[in-house]
Amino acid sequence: MTEQIPESWQPILEPVLDSPESRRLGGWLRTEEEEAGKTVYPPRGCRLRALELTPLDEVRVVILGQDPYHGPGQAMGLSFSVPQGEKVPPSLRNIYKELESDCGIPRPEHGDLTGWARQGVLLLNNTLTVEAGKAGSHAGQGWDAVTDACVAAVAAQPVPSVFILWGSHAQAKARRIEGLSDVRDGGKHCVITSPHPSPLSAHRGFFGSRPFSRANAFLNAHGRGRIDWAHTDRALRS
């Protein structure tokens, strides 16, 4: 692994990245990029961007994605997010539609969710790399151990957080995390589940699920403050 682990996550991830599985992942990635000459997204230096922008002790909400976008210029190390200037992908368009319906926030013209990440929304993909043009191509190569450790670390924090799990993949991952349980099941966290915002499934219950207002209601009730989901350019510069 060539990525620098952000300081707050080092006690969690250094033991994981020193494991045989993670060393195999690092070697495999080097072979794919340097020897096979394959293009991998996001580029080096951006693969732990979600952890860099959202320190462990500042996490208030976790939104789990599956793997990075596999088109050129899209992946930026944050789940569902693309840089300003890139076309807003279909799933993110549906997220914006639900945000408008839920909170009355006009749909942003860009897809950069950095403003959310800087407020404590951990935008974490399960798999942190992908081969160009091949969705899901790096699944099962060892990233699960890294991202499982991140989610487990948030679940183990002494303060309550919100976990927004869209689709069966994110929900299955959460079930593997020891200590992560809904307040309804005796846990301290709020776990919000719904179908994925993909155009293939959004109409099966994602629309109308109101994840943003529900997350803020829980955070307010537990003294953790609201997320400003209107991630304006001002929020991005702050």
Image: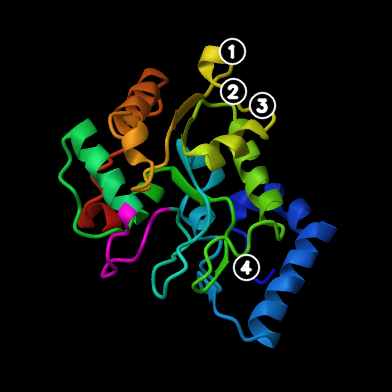
Mark 2 and mark 3 in contact? Answer it, CB < 8 Å.
yes
* Circle on res. 179: 3
> Which one is in front, 99 or 5?
99
Distance CA(mark 2)–CA(mark 4): 31 Å
User: Left or right of 99: which side holds 211?
Assistant: right
Mark closer to the chain start, 4 or 3: 4
The mark that comes first in sequence, 1 or 4, is 4
SS for callout 2: loop
Q: Position of residue 206 (x, y in %)?
A: 35, 35
**Residue 186: mark:** 1
> Residue at the location (49% across, 30% down)?
161
Q: In which quarter of the image is residue 219?
A: top left
163 or 65, which lies in front?
65
- Decide: few, some or many residues near mark 2? Use Cα within 10 Å; few <14, some 14-19, many ≥20: some
Residue drawn at 27 percent across, 40 percent down: 228
Magenta extent: 80-90
Residue 71 x/y as whole percent: 42, 71
Quadrant holding the C terminus:
bottom left
* Element at label 3: loop
Q: Name the residue under label 2.
A: 181
Residue 151 in the image: above or below residue 93: above
**Are dots 1 and 2 in contact, CB under 8 Å?**
yes
Residue assigned mark 4: 3
Nearer to me, 188 or 97 = 97
User: In the figure, is residue 132 to the left or right of 215?
Assistant: right
